[in-house]
């Protein structure tokens, strides 16, 4: 049976981890998000996710909705993309929090992560 929890080992928590993603990570753009992605040397653990949602995105309710939907997408697809990556997701200002749902997140993240998976398989 596959577990679909998203524990602490799957999250970026320290400022240093976020800084590494911002400084050394490669930027990937979608319509509503910017992803900073760094490949980890240690191949275990799969994806680790960090979220940065600024106050410019709206009030706490809007910011928390964005974070919940993005986390839910990665939780549901964690076994589809078992890559040793650190990912920081930053929403763009044009994203409306009340319009964001799981279908939109899937539409934006799946092609990008599929490309990364194909690149990792090729190298």
Image (tube, rainbow, N blue to C red):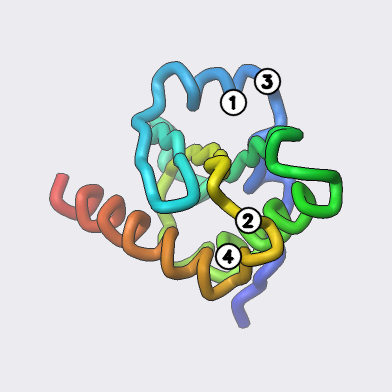
Mark 2 and mark 3: Cα distance apart in space: 27 Å
**Picture coordinates of residue 91 (x, y %)?**
56, 44
| 39 up-or-down from 78: above or below | above
Of 44 and 77, which appears nearest the observer?
77
Q: Name the side, left or right, on which 43 lies relative to 93.
A: left
> Which numbered circle lies on residue 15?
3
Mark 1 and mark 3: Cα distance apart in space: 5 Å
- The residue labelled by disc 2 is 96
> Which numbered circle lies on residue 83?
none
Crowd tier of the residue under label 4, counting other residues whose Cα lies within 10 Å: few below 14, some 14–19, many 20 or above: some
Crowd tier of the residue under label 2, counting other residues whose Cα lies within 10 Å: few below 14, some 14–19, many 20 or above: some
Q: Name the side, left or right, on which 45 lies relative to 111.
A: right
Q: Name the side, left or right, on which 38 lies relative to 76.
A: left
Picture quadrant where residue 76 is located: bottom right
Helix, strand or loop under label 2: loop
Crowd tier of the residue under label 1, counting other residues whose Cα lies within 10 Å: few below 14, some 14–19, many 20 or above: many
- The residue labelled by disc 4 is 73
């Amino acid at each position: 049976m596959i577990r679909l929890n998203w524990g602490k080992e799957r999250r970026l928590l320290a400022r240093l981890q976020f800084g590494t993603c911002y400084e050394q990570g490669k930027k990937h753009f979608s319509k509503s998000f910017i992803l900073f992605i760094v490949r980890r040397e240690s191949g275990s653990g799969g994806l680790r996710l960090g979220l940065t949602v600024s106050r410019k995105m709206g009030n706490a309710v809007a910011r928390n909705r964005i974070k919940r939907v993005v986390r839910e997408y990665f939780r549901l697809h964690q076994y589809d993309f078992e890559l040793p990556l650190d990912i920081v997701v930053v929403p763009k200002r044009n994203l409306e929090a009340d319009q964001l749902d799981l279908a939109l997140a899937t539409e934006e993240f799946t092609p990008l992560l599929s490309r990364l998976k194909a690149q990792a398989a090729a190298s």
